[in-house]
Amino acid sequence: MAAKTDYYELLGVARDAGEADIKKAFRKAAMQYHPDRNPGDQHAEDMFKQCAEAYDVLSDPDKRSRYDRFGHAAFQAAGGGGGGGYTSMDDLFNHFGDIFGDIFGGRGGGRQRRASR
């Protein structure tokens, strides 16, 4: 298994970055790697998920504190309570709908759920 990239490096922010800087960096990364902007690009989708995971941890003071002390190991134990673990893009969009709505003008980054018939 490949080592995970440092969340601060992934978003391109300093370890002492404030909430606004972290959010700005995540928005920039989300624009770059969003699956709707990179259809069929698995690397972009993987980067998008990693950036969302980094934002999830760094934007939450408790998770960030644990990450700063223990790194990725803080979330590896069962029930670690952080670090993403999104099983699908829908999970990710549901979790970050407010951020993606701000970026792409609608909840879920422009993705629409279709009702099954």
Image: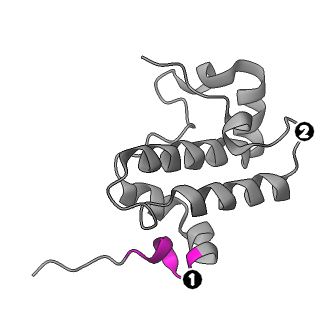
Helix, strand or loop status at disc 1 = loop
Please name the residue shown 68% across and 55% down the image: 26
Compared across the picture, whether 42 is left or right of 37 comes to left
Q: Is residue 17 magenta?
A: no
Of the 4 image quadrants, the one containing the N terminus is: top left
Give how far across and how far down residue 9 sits, in percent.
Answer: 72, 35
Callout 2: 10 Å neighbours few (<14), some, many (20+)? few
Residue ID for mark 2? 16
Q: Nearer the viewer, residue 67 or 102?
A: 102
Please name the residue shown 46% across and 64% down the image: 94
Please name the residue shown 57% across and 27% down the image: 75
Q: Amino acid at mark 1?
A: Gly
Compared across the picture, whether 69 is left or right of 92 comes to right
Q: Is residue 16 above or below residue 32?
A: above
Of the 4 image quadrants, the one containing the C terminus is: bottom left
Q: Which residues are magenta?
A: 104-111
Give me the disc on residue 105: 1
Farthest residue in the left direction? 117
Helix, strand or loop status at disc 2 = loop
